[in-house]
Image (spheres, rainbow, N blue to C red):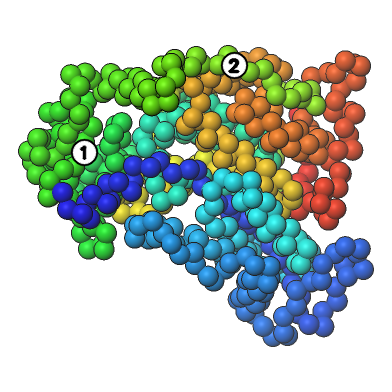
Amino acid sequence: MSSSAEETTQEVFQIPRLTFGVELEFLVAWLYYGEPDRLDKVEGMPLVFRVAQGSDEEVAMESIQNEISRLFEAHDLPVEVTTTGYETPFAEEVLSKYSKIGVTTDPSVHEAPIFGNFKFAGMEIQTFVAPDDPEAFEIVDYIRSLLIRYFRVRVNPTCGLHVHVGQGAERFSPDRLRRISSLVWAAEPLLVMLNHPFRIANDTCEPQRERGNISRLGSGIPVFPPTHCRTENEEHNACVRYVAAEVRHGEALTSWREQNVSWREKRPYYVADYTKAFEDARRDGGDEPFQIRGEGPSNSKEDTYKVEDYGMNIDEVIEFRIDEYLKNTSTSTGAAPKERPESPEPAGPSRTRNIPRIKNSRPTAEQLNWFADHLGNYFQNILNINEGGRFTDPGVFEGQLRGPSHFDMVSFRAYTCMEYKSGLLRTIEFRGAEGNLSWWVKWWAKICVGLVRFAINAPVDEFIRVLMNCERSMKEEYVYDIIDLIDDLGLPAEAAAAEFRIKEIAGEWEFEFADNKEGDSFAEQEQEAADVADPDGIYSATPKIQPIKPT
């Protein structure tokens, strides 16, 4: 085997840890020099951004963009310096764009002309790719706190808070992807309880349980057809034949396949195209893993892959190696042979919840259309329920017929055939949250990352138990809610934060709570929660929309 092929194979065997990035969409208020500022006497209000008289909106937006970049640089947050030291040239190509803070203008974010002489610039911040360390989430919180301290910012219904979750330069394997997709599908009606109800009525973050292909089929509506793998062209179909095929135990990860395929031959890290050899091994080799040896691609099964021959199938090989490890470890230390540890009993709750359960209700068609009528000043792509945009929810265990879209509430767009073939995207994007610059940003990011972590790591019985509880929550009231789900994901701190958020928004969003022991409804006790100050002592930058009027 050539040294370059060997090095590439070895580098991708280590499954990377989860990484994430956050997109913050918001508006910055600005005025021309000399224009009156009717809010300049408000205590704690940052100075309004000003531009020279006669400057057009484009100049103002560019000035604000540059000023935000300077602010981040002054606080040691990289917006120009790109991180170096990537493990491979391929990793550099995938990640270099996301290794610094992106500060861009966003024309999709705009404000209605209802604030007098104030003008607003739509902006977007993309945080750099970071591992799921506690410090990384604190950096996200630091970024948003700088924005609200130094700029007069606001968010409205055109703004979103998007969280990308991935594995660095590596794609999620098909088995992990199925788990993540299954949990997202099951938990979607609970997750939306932490996001403003108007997001469900927005065509840029469509809930799949109500508007995806399975729900369309259940309502007798034609599904969105797949847009990939329609021809017999070998290169076109290589996504499912090779790059996106199942990763078996003992095989190199998906990124190795991406680097060893014909369409990559002009890239510096290209080694060889093993598509045909891979197919031959899959077709003739039973369930052995595909492993490269020799000097280059070959159609011969014996020359292109191997598995150590223990006279067993691959599951037995794994068992044999575990037993050998335990035996060898005890022999080298002189101790008695180790016994395999028994699986621990499931632990009880790690904390006591602080609020009653909430009713897992969904906005009615009338309520969603009320949003459409009242948000018409902000965008045209608001859902019109009366035009048939909402379909039958098939439930948790109906599976999915997913045609990944950029505008799903949780987008798997990076795993379309075209992205496998030529794209560098590899994250799952949580798009369901409304624009926000409050303390909640980092906690929502933690919940999104934690959900993915649970999906790929949870024991099968725990995973199925959560899916069954999600199903039960849609059939019975006050038995399982979003707080229970976050606790079950192993995120006690995030669950406590979600409880605090629910206290804040209970009045505005008109949540219904199970009665407490005293008999008074929790909603009545927390009537003032909607006006709770931001814990940072500044102010909460969350969209203020009228409550859902129709009941």
Left or right: residue 344 compared with residue 143: left
At x 18%, y 19%, the residue is: 311
In the rendered structure, find residue 477 and report the number of the disc placed on it.
none
Left or right: residue 314 compared with residue 400: left
- Under mark 1, the amino acid is Gln
**Which picture quadrant has residue 34?**
bottom right
Q: Which residue is mark 2?
A: 346
**Circle 1 crowding by C-alpha within 10 Å: few under 14, some 14–19, many from 20:** some
Residue 421 point in image, percent of width and height: 29, 50
Residue 455 point in image, percent of width and height: 50, 30
Query: In this view of the protein, which residue sits in the foreground, 42 or 485?
Result: 485
Q: Helix, strand, or loop for circle 2?
A: loop
Q: Which residue is mark 1?
A: 291
**Which picture quadrant has residue 330?**
top left
At x 28%, y 37%, the residue is: 251
Location of residue 546 with respect to 363 vertically, above or below: below
Residue 425 point in image, percent of width and height: 41, 52
> Which residue appears farthest toward the left when viewing the image?
300
- Under mark 2, the amino acid is Pro
At x 28%, y 34%, the residue is: 250
- Decide if residue 375 is in sight here: no
At x 56%, y 21%, the residue is: 466
